[in-house]
Amino acid sequence: MSQSSDIERLRALSGIKWRRYGDDVIPAWVADMDFPTAPAIIDALRTMVDASDFGYNGVSFDDSIPKAWAEWSERRFGWRPDVERTKVFSTSLQAIATALMVGTSAGDGVLLFTPVYPPFFGMIEKSGRTLVEYHLDQAELRIDEDLLRSAIEPGTRAVILCNPHNPTGRVFDLAELTAIARVAEERDLLVISDEIWQDFVYPGARHIPFASLSTEAMARCVTVTAASKSFSLGGLSCAVANLGDARVAEGFAALPPHLLGDVNALGACATLAAWTHGEAWLAETVDALHANRDHLVARLTAELPEVGIAMPQATYVAWLDFRRTGVAVDPAAQLLKRGRVGLSSGPDFGVAGEGFARLNFATHPDLLDQIIDRIGLVCHATA
Ligand SMILES: Cc1ncc(COP(=O)(O)O)c(C=O)c1O
């Protein structure tokens, strides 16, 4: 679908992506896609709506979603999460925050590979845990085993791994994941593995679930994912977590009943439809994003070589380095003000994000071109 036929729909949406800024701004920030939803999901939701099927919902209580995820994960990544050890949550962040509360104590250190998805920082700070950072080398973006060992402090108890990695688009490979598993074993760390970007991996890279490495890795891991990123269902709130770590599983079981609430029936319905009937739609979407990624990188390299871009191996976000441009100080704010284009602010992803901004390229190609044009105008005007 072209931008011209879809822009009215996008501008009328209630979601935050298109609502936050004025009508003259093209948003390229929060990780929602601009494409219409997969027909299989719309059909499933429509059936519920048409039947006024809004009573307490079986799908959110039984094991249909854990089973659907287990099959999805086995088919796509060769790892079948244990249904018995899988819980359904409202959001991935709820599952991650709860795992952190249950699996660590106040004062414990929690390691992040920074720059990283901003909500993790607040979770650590507000729960009285201590932030421990592994600063990814901004050129290589690789995890080095010895550097990881030296980043870990005596009170470090957990790692929140984001793989594929937001915002850099890195897919950590077998050697890197094995290194994390080895260090976690040595230092008795809980690994909370956020794999919500698992489905957007481009040719040349492969997603390896951390828990699939070995029985030992699984036994110290909580794997969190959802259909919400792959199918752009963020507002429907449904996620899953495999509680491989027995201590964490016991901690969850001991929580007061109802503390976490139940999953919304529409979110459960959409998730089930996505994981059972959504694969062909997803494959087409990943192809479109792959083309967008290549187009973005080709245009930036040719027209704006002063803007650095690490080729994303996965995700639909690009981590742009504006440090050699005239908008090096909070580039997202300057691009919004001068260019009317809304990127995510780099410093929100940690101190390593100074001089960077994150661009969401999950949009129609003509809108993506306008986003690049606007960035180019601002960079050239401030050069
Ligand atoms: C790495 C990562 N984790 C979690 C989320 C949020 O997921 P949820 O809406 O299920 O909490 C996002 C959303 O962009 C994300 O990028």
Image (spheres, helix red, strand yellow):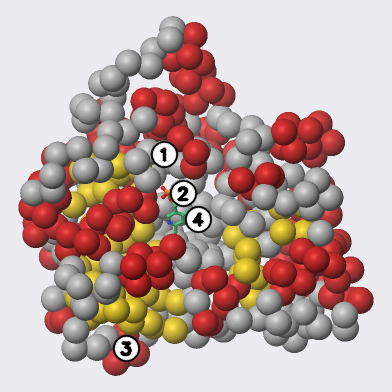
Distance between mark 3 and mark 4 Cα atoms: 28 Å
Distance between mark 1 and mark 4 Cα atoms: 23 Å
- Contact check, label 3 and label 1, Cβ < 8 Å: no
Is residue 369 depicted above or below 44 in this figure?
below
Checking the image for residue 201, the label placed there is: 4
- Contact check, label 3 and label 4, Cβ < 8 Å: no
Distance between mark 3 and mark 2 Cα atoms: 30 Å
Instruction: Find out if the beta carbon at label 1 lies less than 8 Å from the nearest ligand 1 atom.
Output: yes
For the point 53% across and 59% down, the residue is 314
Q: Is the residue marked by circle 3 packed among few (<14), some (14-19), or many (20+) residues within 10 Å?
A: some
Q: Is the residue marked by circle 2 packed among few (<14), some (14-19), or many (20+) residues within 10 Å?
A: many
What residue is shown with label 3? 151
Q: Which amino acid does label 4 sit on?
A: Val
For the point 21% across and 77% down, the residue is 108
Q: What residue type is labelled 3?
A: Ala
For marks 1 and 4 on the same chain, the one whose residue lies earlier in the sequence = 4
What residue is shown with label 1? 237
Q: Position of residue 154 (x, y in %)?
A: 19, 88
**Res 373 seen here:** yes
Residue closest to the eye, 93 or 269: 93
For the point 27% across and 74% down, the residue is 129
Q: What element carries label 4?
A: loop
Distance between mark 2 and mark 1 Cα atoms: 18 Å
Q: Position of residue 217 (x, y in %)?
A: 18, 65
Residue closest to the eye, 334 or 193: 334
For the point 78% across and 37% down, the residue is 7
Q: Is mark 2 on a helix, strand or loop?
A: loop
Q: What residue type is labelled 2?
A: Asp
Instruction: Find out if the beta carbon at label 2 lies less than 8 Å from the nearest ligand 1 atom.
Output: no
Judged by depth in the image, the label closer to the viewer, 2 or 1, is 1
Q: Is the residue marked by circle 4 packed among few (<14), some (14-19), or many (20+) residues within 10 Å?
A: many
Q: Is mark 1 on a helix, strand or loop?
A: loop
